[in-house]
Amino acid sequence: MIKASIQTIEEFKEVLLQLPDECYAKPCETLSNSSIGQHTRHIIELYQCLLQGYHLNEISYDRRKRDKRIEQDLFFAIQQLQEIQNSLERPDRDLQVSYDLHDSEVSLKSNYFREVMYNLEHTIHHQALIKVGIGQFTTMSLPESFGVAPSTLQYRNQCVR
């Protein structure tokens, strides 16, 4: 799963490197006026929460930084993705994940590998949305796997046989 996460982030970086600069921070009507950069920031910051919380044994995805520079500066975002790739390989360990829900906080037991898997699925979900934004702004050709769950790709391959 860590290898799959690193590969998914690598594919994401390659797509972002092809994206025209002016498209990255531009509001996209089909994404409720959010931008590709905002979705990218969201992906990055959840991974950052996981990596920062690893040594504390406590993660809160709700209390992330929300760094505007990530959503506005394409090359800074790519640097952040590279840092995530370089830091992701770690041993499994127990973690507490807290969520702010309607004026109360809920804390759940989890572990590092489970949260890496959550972030991978979360990334793929947002890549599917980013794919819509890219389609609105460009005629870029995207990899077949971009924004598609591995199980969906396997299913499609089985149907072709």
Image (cartoon, grey):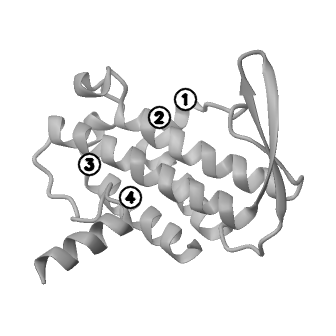
Taking the spot 58% from the left edge, 55% from the top edge, the residue there is 118
Residue at 60% x, 32% y is 67
Which of the marked residues, 4 or 1, is nearer the chain's N terminus? 4
Q: Residue flagged by tag 4: what amino acid is it?
A: Phe
Q: Residue 106's spot in the image, x, y percent?
A: 80, 33
Q: Quadrant of the N terminus?
A: bottom right
Q: Residue 19, which numbered label?
A: 3
The residue drawn where x is 47% and y is 52% is 123
- Which SS class for mark 2? helix
Q: Which mark is residue 68?
A: 1
Residue that numbered label 2 is attached to: 71
- The picture places residue 6, in percent across and down from the top left corner, at 51, 70
- The 10 Å Cα crowd at callout 2, few under 14, some 14 to 19, many 20 or more, is many
88 or 20: nearer the eye?
A: 88
Indicate which label's residue lies in the foreground, 3 or 4.
4
> What crowding class fits label 3: few (fewer than 14 Cα within 10 Å), some (14-19), or many (20 or more)?
some
Q: Is residue 148 left or right of residue 82?
A: left
Residue to which mark 4 is pinned: 12
Label 4 and label 1: CA atoms lie apart by 19 Å
The Cα atoms of the two marked residues, 4 and 2, are separated by 15 Å
Q: Secondary structure at mark 1?
A: helix
First in sequence: mark 3 vs mark 1: 3
Circles 4 and 1, Cβ within 8 Å, touching? The answer is no
Residue 85 vertical position relative to residue 50 in the rendered view, above or below:
below
Spatial CA distance of label 3 from label 4 is 11 Å
Residue type, mark 3 in image: Leu
Compare marks 3 and 4 and give the one earlier in the sequence: 4
Q: Report if the CB atoms under discs 2 and 1 are less than 8 Å apart.
A: yes
Query: Which numbered disc, 4 or 1, marks the residue closer to the eye?
Result: 4
Seen in the picture, residue 36 relative to 124 is either above or below; the reply is above
Q: Of marks 4 and 2, which one's residue comes earlier in the chain?
A: 4
Crowding near pointer 1: few (<14 within 10 Å), some, many (20+)? few
